[in-house]
Each structure stands twice: as structure tokens, then as C-alpha cells.
Image (cartoon, rainbow, N blue to C red):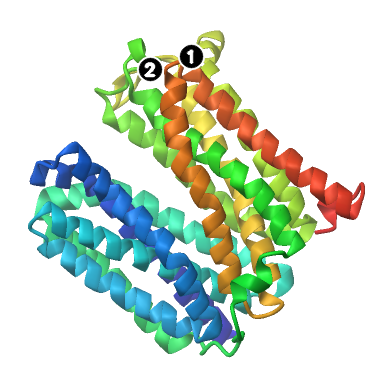
């Protein structure tokens, strides 16, 4: 039992270290834009290089994990991540930074896929979502600490100190994986993706996930934009108080982090598909409420002035509450959804490919949604949230419809 716990702890540390590195670069991205005086095209490449590398790495890394030893692939990706952050400390041009971002995309994808695949294999079937929820909580904890600490550390000590911390997290994670995690004995011959392509349960999940990607990308991206943009452009004008926007972003991550270990356990007990359905529906309902936060604040008499952050508006507390509730909603869905993907993959040893499919299905919505959001802003920013909510509702209704057809009236509690 102790050996099993240490395996999980090593994988949780891996999730934490990978999440810390990801959010650190997101936080420092504006600093690099200013440092290299990057053009608009190059600024786009700073993000596109990361995203394209992630997409390109999914299939070969998942294939390597299912055909070989997932622990070995994970250790290799952790080593690549450490090398990448050393490279970030040495970059001297925009082109070098783009190359480092591409390497980071491969490393982040590999550590995410392999750590989740190993957790899915190690966890008993009736506790998969519990362990996945704990792993995700570690990732969200890293996001909070990284977003709050990276900028401060860079301001005090420079880039070298930031990347020294990242390497200092990755190396213990690498040692922990190599020392405590058992070699992966489950392998699959042939192409594991082909065997999963027509899996009925995965098709049911992807019918939801493809639509839900649009909802989450729109809402998660536009809540801080709604808070920060000038009133004339449909926002709340918190631009001068960056701390207020930081608090809004942190609220969603904090509630997600705190809830996932418990919601994962509950979904193992009550039914994972039920939690996917309820979490998706709650996300849509809260998204609908976001544009009405000024009216809600005025109606309840919410304060407009706050300690430290200063004068904002009566909408701030309702918006903060909404974003915290979005984190709760996502905490209901995420561990349950991941456990369902793991369930299908572990049956034939192709769990890494199952998570790879999960990752690939998310990509189209996450790429297209920002462009859709930009177009909707021409009509009115509230329509971004209305369409996001509609995508969430459409996703859960499709999900329930397929389940009901396959399992009958009690579909949500039978899977």
C-alpha cells in the first residue's frame, strides 16, 4: 500500500511541476514580447508554436506510451521539460523563443498524457476519478502559485531564478517517477488509435466534449476580458486594477483545485456520467449569468470599493462569485470525464491513446472558439457568454440523448 501511495505521489508531483511550468510561461509572455520587441505576427507565433507542437505530439507520444513503457516516456518528457526551461533562460531572440515554446509544447503534452495514463492504470476502477481529481488539484495549485509567483520572482531576481525553480521542481519529479513508479507492463500491438476509433462510449463522450470545448474556451477566455475591457467596448473597465482581474482568474482555479478531490470521489460513488451532465449544465447556467453581474450587483447592493484593489463596481463580487462557481462546475465534470476515458483505455491497454483522443477532440473547439468570440464581440460581448452557455447545453443534451438511447431512463447512473 505504501509503495502504491508513493507511485501516486510521484505522479501528483509531476502534474504540479508541469502545471507550474506552463502557467509561468503564460505569465511571462508579455515580458518576452516587450523584451524582443516582437511584431504582431511573431507574438502569434509565441502561442501558435506551443499549440501546434502539442497537437503534433499527441499521437506519437500516446502511441509510444501504449506500445512501450509509459514510465520511460514520462521520464523522457520530464527530462525534455528540464532542458527546455534551461533553454528559456538562454534564449536571445524571438526565433529561439519560438523554438523553445515548441519544445515546451511537446514536453507539456507528454507529461500530461503519460501521468494521467499511469494514474488511470494504477487506480482501481472504482476510485479512478478520485485519484485523477487529486492529480488535477495539484495542477491547479501549481497554476495559482505560478501565476502569483512567477512575475514577482522575475522582477526580483530575473529569468534565471524563475527557471532554476522550474528545474528544481522537475528534477525531483523525474527522480520520483524513476524511483517509485513501476515499469509499465501493459502494451498493445498495432495501432491503438484504430482500436478506439469506433468505441461507442468514446464516441458518446466526444460528442459532448467537442461542443463543450467551445463553451469553456469562450467563457474562460472572455471572463477576464469582460472584466478588463473598457466600458465603451462592453467590459467593466478594470484595466487599471490588474489585481482585480488576477483575483477573478484565481477564483476559478482555486475552487476547481479545492473541489476536485471530493467531486472525483463522489463521481466514483454516484456515477461518472451523471457528474459530466450536471457539471456541464451548471457551467452553462453560470455562463448565462455573467453578463448580468452588473444588474445583480446593483440589485443586492454589493459594495463598489474594496481593500487593496480600490474602487471597482458593484459587479465585482457577483462576477467573482460566478467565476468561482465556474470552477466548481468544471470540478464536477473533469475528473469524471477523465475517469470515463481511462475506463475505456485500460480495458485493452490503450489508456494513453484514449487520453490522446480526449486531447485531440478538444483542439478544434479551442482553436475556433476565440475567433468566434471575436466576431461575437461585434454584436455585443454578452453574446459570447450566451453562445458559450448554448454550447454547454447542446453538449449535455447530446450526451444524455445518446446515453438514454443506449441505456434507457437510468442512463446517467449506469455509466
Badge 1 marks a residue whose secondary structure is: helix
Task: For residue 307, say whether it is visible.
Answer: yes
Q: In which quarter of the image is residue 192?
A: bottom right
Q: Report the label total.
A: 2
- Closest to the observer, 69 or 182: 69
Q: Residue at x 41, y 27 (%)?
A: 374
The one of 319 and 119 positioned closer to us in this rendering: 119
Residue 401 on image: x %, y %: 81, 43
Residue corresponding to mark 2:
236
136 left or right of 98 in image: right
Q: Position of residue 357 (x, y in %)?
A: 58, 62
Please report whichever mark, 1 or 2, sits nearer to the chain's N-terminal start.
2
Q: Which residue, as the protein is rendered here, is positioned at the far right?
A: 409
* Residue 321 spot, x, y in % from top left: 52, 30
- Element type at mark 2: loop
In the image, is 190 to the left or to the right of 343?
left
Residue at image point 27% right, 25% down: 241
**In the picture shown, does residue 65 fall above or below 289?**
below
Q: In this view, does 120 lie to the left or right of 17?
A: right
Relative side of 17 to 3, left or right:
left
What residue is disc 1 on?
294
Would residue 149 be visible to someone looking at this image? no
Residue at x 52%, y 58% (from the top left corner)? 359
Q: In which quarter of the image is the N terminus?
A: bottom right
Q: Which residue is drawn at 87% across and 54% down?
A: 406
Residue 350 numbered mark, or none: none
Q: How far apart are the two marked residues, 1 and 2, measured between alpha carbons?
A: 9 Å
Mark 1: few, some, or many residues within 10 Å (few <14, many ≥20)? some
Decide: few, some or many residues near mark 2? Use Cα within 10 Å; few <14, some 14-19, many ≥20: many
Residue 208 drawn above or below residue 169: above
Residue 124 vs 379, above or below: the answer is: below
Instruction: Say whether marks 1 and 2 touch (CB < 8 Å).
Output: yes
Amino acid at each position: 500500500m505504501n509503495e502504491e501511495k508513493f507511485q501516486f505521489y510521484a505522479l501528483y508531483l509531476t502534474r504540479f511541476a508541469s502545471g507550474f511550468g506552463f502557467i509561468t510561461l503564460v505569465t511571462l509572455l508579455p515580458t518576452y514580447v516587450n523584451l524582443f520587441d516582437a511584431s504582431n505576427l511573431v507574438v502569434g507565433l509565441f502561442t501558435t508554436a506551443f499549440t501546434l507542437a502539442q497537437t503534433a505530439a499527441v499521437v506519437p507520444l500516446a502511441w509510444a506510451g501504449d506500445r512501450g513503457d509509459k514510465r520511460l516516456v514520462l521520464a523522457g518528457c520530464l527530462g525534455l521539460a528540464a532542458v527546455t526551461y534551461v533553454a528559456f533562460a538562454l534564449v536571445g531572440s524571438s526565433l529561439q523563443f519560438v523554438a523553445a515554446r515548441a519544445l515546451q509544447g511537446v514536453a507539456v503534452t507528454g507529461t500530461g498524457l503519460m501521468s494521467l495514463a499511469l494514474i488511470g492504470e494504477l487506480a482501481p476502477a472504482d476510485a479512478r476519478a478520485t485519484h485523477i481529481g487529486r492529480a488535477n488539484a495539484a495542477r491547479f495549485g501549481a497554476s495559482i502559485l505560478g501565476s502569483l509567483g512567477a512575475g514577482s520572482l522575475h522582477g526580483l531576481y530575473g529569468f534565471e531564478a524563475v527557471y532554476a525553480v522550474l528545474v528544481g521542481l522537475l528534477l525531483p519529479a523525474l527522480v520520483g517517477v524513476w524511483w517509485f513508479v513501476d515499469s509499465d507492463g501493459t502494451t498493445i500491438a498495432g495501432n491503438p488509435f484504430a482500436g478506439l476509433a469506433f468505441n461507442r462510449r468514446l464516441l458518446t463522450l466526444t460528442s459532448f466534449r467537442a461542443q463543450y470545448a467551445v463553451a469553456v474556451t469562450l467563457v474562460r477566455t472572455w471572463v477576464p476580458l469582460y472584466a478588463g475591457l473598457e466600458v465603451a467596448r462592453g467590459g467593466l473597465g478594470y484595466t487599471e486594477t490588474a489585481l482585480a482581474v488576477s483575483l477573478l482568474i484565481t477564483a476559478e482555479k482555486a475552487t476547481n483545485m479545492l473541489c476536485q478531490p471530493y467531486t472525483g470521489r463522489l463521481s466514483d460513488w454516484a456515477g461518472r456520467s451523471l457528474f459530466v451532465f450536471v457539471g456541464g449544465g451548471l457551467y452553462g447556467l453560470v455562463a448565462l449569468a455573467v453578463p448580468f453581474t452588473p444588474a445583480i450587483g446593483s440589485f443586492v447592493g454589493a459594495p463598489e470599493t474594496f481593500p487593496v484593489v480600490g474602487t471597482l463596481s458593484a459587479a465585482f463580487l457577483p462576477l467573482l462569485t460566478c467565476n468561482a462557481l465556474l470552477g466548481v462546475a468544471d470540478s464536477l465534470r473533469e475528473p469524471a470525464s477523465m475517469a470515463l476515458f481511462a475506463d475505456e483505455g485500460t480495458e485493452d491497454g490503450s489508456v494513453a491513446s484514449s487520453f490522446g483522443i480526449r486531447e485531440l477532440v478538444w483542439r478544434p473547439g479551442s482553436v475556433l472558439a476565440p475567433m468566434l468570440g471575436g466576431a461575437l464581440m461585434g454584436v455585443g460581448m454578452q453574446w459570447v457568454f450566451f453562445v458559450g452557455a448554448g454550447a454547454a447545453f447542446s453538449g449535455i443534451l447530446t450526451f444524455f440523448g445518446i446515453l438514454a438511447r443506449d441505456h434507457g431512463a437510468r442512463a446517467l447512473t449506469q455509466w
